[in-house]
Amino acid sequence: ALTRARVPIVKLMDPVTEISCDICVNNSLAIVNTKLLHDYAQIDVRLRQLAFIVKHWAKARQVNETYRGTLSSYA
């Protein structure tokens, strides 16, 4: 668990599939950001593809952990 984060986060990972998940509660800003990204994707369908590519790139280079001072999911 990340107890010093602005919004406390529990990080989980299934060791078999290596699928990871972050859980947080009462993070209303994340809901607003998600809606904003959805609205942008409705304007230009290429945004979804671009976001996937950037997310994959960041994960491959290990620069996708906000709590370590790198990119956030919304960067």
Image (cartoon, rainbow, N blue to C red):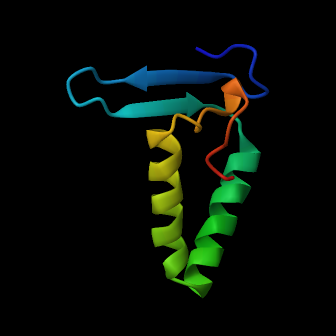
In this picture, residue 24 sits left or right of residue 32: left
Q: Position of residue 28 (x, y in %)?
A: 74, 46
**Residue lying farthest left?**
16
Rendered position, 18 above or below 55: above
Q: Position of residue 66 (x, y in %)?
A: 68, 33
Q: Position of residue 58 (x, y in %)?
A: 53, 45
Who is closer to the viewer here, 28 or 70?
Answer: 70
Q: How many marks?
A: 0
Rendered position, 48 above or below 4: below
In this picture, residue 38 sits left or right of residue 6: left
**Residue lying farthest bottom?**
43
Name the residue rendered at 64%, 16% in the picture: 2
**Residue lying farthest front?**
61
Quarter in which the N terminus is drawn: top right
Name the residue rendered at 20%, 24% in the picture: 16
Who is closer to the viewer here, 38 or 19?
Answer: 19
Name the residue rendered at 67%, 42% in the picture: 71
In this picture, residue 75 sits left or right of residue 64: right
Using the rendered view, name the quadrant where residue 19 is placed: top left
Rendered position, 40 above or below 63: below
Q: Position of residue 61 (x, y in %)?
A: 50, 39
Using the rendered view, name the quadrant where residue 7 is placed: top right
Name the residue rendered at 29%, 29% in the picture: 18
